[in-house]
Structures are given as structure tokens and as C-alpha cells.
Image: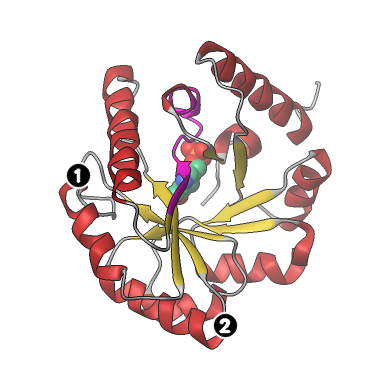
Amino acid sequence: MLKITIRDNLLFINERIEKAKIKSGRNDEIKLIAVTKTVDVETINEAINAGITDIGENKVQELEKKIALLNDRVNYHMIGYLQSNKVKYIVNKVDLIHSLDRLSLAKEIDKRAKEHNIVANTLLQINVAEEETKSGLKVCDVIPFIEEIQQFTNIGIRGLMTIAPLTDNENLLRNVFKTMVNIKKDINSRRYDNVSMNYLSMGMTNDFEIAIEEGANLIRVGTGLFGKRNY
Ligand SMILES: *Cc1c(COP(=O)(O)O)cnc(C)c1O
């Protein structure tokens, strides 16, 4: 039997990214983050050799373990719910925290970033569909939240992140992604300090083509690259 490799999966995903870009008339860069939760380091190395430059983890402990083993071979993204008491372990090691969603967390990120004399790059996580099981700001709370965190000098907001509902309802997915684009435009028009809307982190295995068509430039793909996860 022919073995499907990570390289094959990556080629296929890159083809689909290109098709989605052409379909929507885009020629800007779309960065693929390989979501490596539950994936062992040997397999991650295979992905890196195939061309992966960025990996995402949703648990601090896993992220720390992988950083220790892979060092500066890749860029790191914290994509999951972040407990305030764990910020100190990763704040100076990750390129981007995708899951800033509350004031207490902002306060802690700012404090720890100050200790390292850095500005921590973050995305605001938005729970567009207001799903009970997901964290993230409500759409109506985004602007007030940004205004509150203007006081923190060591946090940079670089864009927005969402996890869309798990559904094949294309209309619903498009509406979620369009809402994100509208929030981004609204924020841009307000010209805050320490806020730039460089990134829209949206799109996973189930929906990344639709996300790209609607404007995503960071996509987070796990299953499509590594196969089904064994928890
Ligand atoms: C697991 C996870 C992903 C990747 O999901 P797949 O469906 O396996 O591509 C993306 N984003 C977040 C926040 C995740 O936790």
C-alpha cells in the first residue's frame, strides 16, 4: 500500500490554498500554521523538512515541550485558551498569542512582557457565533475591550482570530468570516496606538478555503496535515 506522507498532505493543502487565492483574486501571502497538538516531534520534523515554518499548540505544557526540542527551527503560535498563571512560561517564546480574550489575561501578558522588555504580539479571539463551548470576546465587546487595553504598553494587537462553528453550512461559515472582516475594518478606521490589523487568523481543516476566500491570511490546519488526532 502506498503511504501518504506529510509532504503529500502539505502539497495538497498548498494546492487548495492557491486555488482559493485565485478564486478570490488574491495575491498576498497566506501563512499556514501546522497545528501540532498530539503530534510527536519526529512527525513535526518531517513537516518542517517538507516546508512548514510555523506551528501552533493549544496547551502551554505541550508548547513548552516542543519549543525545548525544536528550538528556533520554527515559529510558535499559542492558539488555545491561555490561563493567566501560565503566561510567564511562553510570553517571550511565542511569535503570536492568538487567544487574547479577557482583561485579566491582558494584564498578565503586559506584566510578563515588561519583565522581558518586549512587546507581546497578540490576536483578539472573537466568538462570532457565540458558542457556549468556545472562548472569545463577543462581537459587541471588541471595541470596548481594545479601549481598555490601551493602557497596557507591552501588548501589541496584530489582528483577530476566530474558531468557526464545525459545520458544512457554507453560508453560516461565510457570515462568520465576513463579520471578522467587518470588525477588522471598524478597528482600522479608529487608528488606535499599538493596534494593527495585520492578521486574520481563521480557517481550519474543515473551512480554510472559505476562510481564505473571505480574507484570512493565517490558517491553522491540523487534521489535514497530520491525519486524525489520537487523544
Ligand atoms: C485543533 C485546532 C485547530 C486545527 O484543527 P483541525 O480541524 O485539525 O485543522 C485550529 N485552531 C485551533 C484553535 C485548534 O485548537
Q: Is residue 95 left or right of residue 200?
A: right
Residue at the bottom extreme?
115
Ligand 1 within 8 Å of disc 1? The answer is no
Q: Tag 2: residue type? A: Asn
In reply to whether residue 200 is colored magenta, the answer given is yes
Where's residue 20, x and y in %? 55, 18
Whether 51 is among the magenta residues is no
Residue pictured at 76% horizontal, 67% vertical = 71
Q: Secondary structure at mark 1?
A: loop
Q: Is residue 38 in view?
A: no
Q: Is residue 60 above or below residue 116?
A: above
Q: CA distance from mark 1 to mark 2?
A: 35 Å
Per the rendered image, the range of residues in magenta is 196-212
Residue 103 can be seen, yes or no: yes
Between 139 and 156, the residue placed more toward the observer is 156
Which numbered tag is attached to residue 79? none
- Residue 130 tag number: 1
Expressed as whole percent of the image width and height from the top left, the position of residue 19 reads: 60, 15
For the residue pair 33 and 150, the one nearer the viewer reads as 150
Q: Is residue 148 above or below residue 127?
A: below
Residue 144's spot in the image, x, y percent?
Answer: 19, 59
Secondary structure category for the residue under label 2: loop
- Taking the spot 60% from the left edge, 30% from the top edge, the residue there is 28
Which residue: 31% across, 29% down? 178
Question: Mark 2 — residue?
Answer: 117
User: x%, y% of residue 148?
Assistant: 24, 69
Among the two numbered marks 1 and 2 on one chain, the one whose residue lies closer to the N terminus:
2
Badge nearest the viewer, 1 or 2:
2
10 Å neighbourhood of mark 1: few (<14), some, or many (≥20)?
A: some
